[in-house]
Image: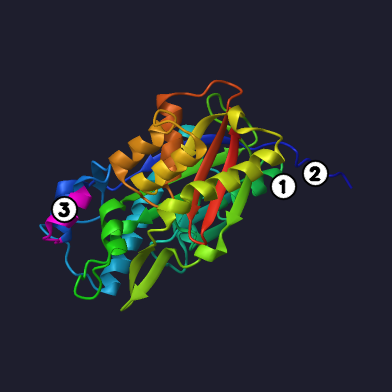
Amino acid sequence: MKKKNTDFSPSIISIATANPSATFTQEEAYKLSGYDDKKIKAIFLNSGIRKRHFFVRPADKVPNESVNELNARYKEGAVETGARAISECLKNAGTNHIDFLAVATCTGYLCPGLSSIYVKKLALNKSLQRTDIQGMGCAGALPALQRGWDHVRANSGSNALVTAVEICSAAYFIDSSIDSSMETIIGNVICGDGGAAVLLGENHVYGMPYILGFHTEIFSDYLDSVGFSSIEGKLKIILGKEIQNIAGKAARKAIEALLKKHSLKFKDIKRWIIHPGGRNVIVNIADELGLTRKELSASYEVLEEYGNMSSPTVLFVLKRMIDSTPPAEGEYGIMLALGPGVAAEAALLRW
């Protein structure tokens, strides 16, 4: 029996992003949230975020939606936003045929999942293999990419579509009579809605990177520090303040292990694609890794223009970097996101 060649590195063929059309400045988002507190307003206006996209209808104040209304808005927004990202990604690649589909999301639950819904809505290959990835939060795009990467390596001539989509505005908790914790306020300050899609394949496309490998580090001592809980059936963000202090050390451990696998050093990495979980998180990672604001400019720009969209955000950073400062051939890059677990998910890229 002929042994499959799994030594090659799949390449990103195409990448696209999408957002709901409604945009809100931080001043507008503060008013929309219904807060009436100068200290909270200052947090909104000094977050490093200029505007965000929400899948909401225009209103003076976010209504106290029921669980059913939140779930319906999540489904409508995730289907619409994710489908636009997928359509643009496939259009850019010049194909509508895909062999594998992975969808990452954490801001709502659907059964059948988004993968099945996209197959029908977009008339995708009905024999494709698929997986829906739930519960990995801001880090979800990287495990989804790895599943697609595994598929392409194991199936000669195949491709894989990876999608990450979140409607964080359907996971806001604004009932301060039940919960007025700082982590809930911070979640309402930084989170936005968006989706991204990436097509992987064997054939390299100029300007796009190969993905050489992945590494995961899970810090179980902080299992309860990031994620969602449920109050009266509604999702409420968990965002322990310790995260902004351990982010850098978690990132370093994952990156060092990944570089060791490929006999590389920190000095070999010229491009940094870091998920902007929040301004303090980026600063902590930058300080730990010795990175300048210029080296993380794409992360800061995405945070400023979109906020933290959870799983798709790191893909927005990748696209921004490719579009604004195209890497030179042969340059290495690190893509990294932190999520529940606490887990640091890293990927090694080469242009």
Question: Could you classify mark 3 by the number of other residues whose Cα lies within 10 Å: few (under 14), some (14-19), or many (20 or more)?
Answer: some
Residue lying furthest top in this view?
A: 328
What's the magenta region?
34-44
Label tally = 3
Q: Nearer the viewer, mark 3 or mark 1?
A: 3
Residue 160, image x and y in percent? Answer: 58, 45
Image quadrant holding the C terminus, namely top right
Relative to the observer, which residue lies in front, 285 or 103? 285
Residue 267, image x and y in percent? Answer: 59, 28
The label shown at residue 4 is 2
Residue at which label 3 appears: 41
* Image: 9 above or below 35: above
Badge 2 marks a residue whose secondary structure is loop
2 and 1 marks in contact (CB < 8 Å): yes
The Cα–Cα distance between marks 3 and 2, rounded to whole angstroms, is 58 Å
Q: Is residue 16 magenta?
A: no
Relative to the observer, which residue lies in front, 239 or 87? 239
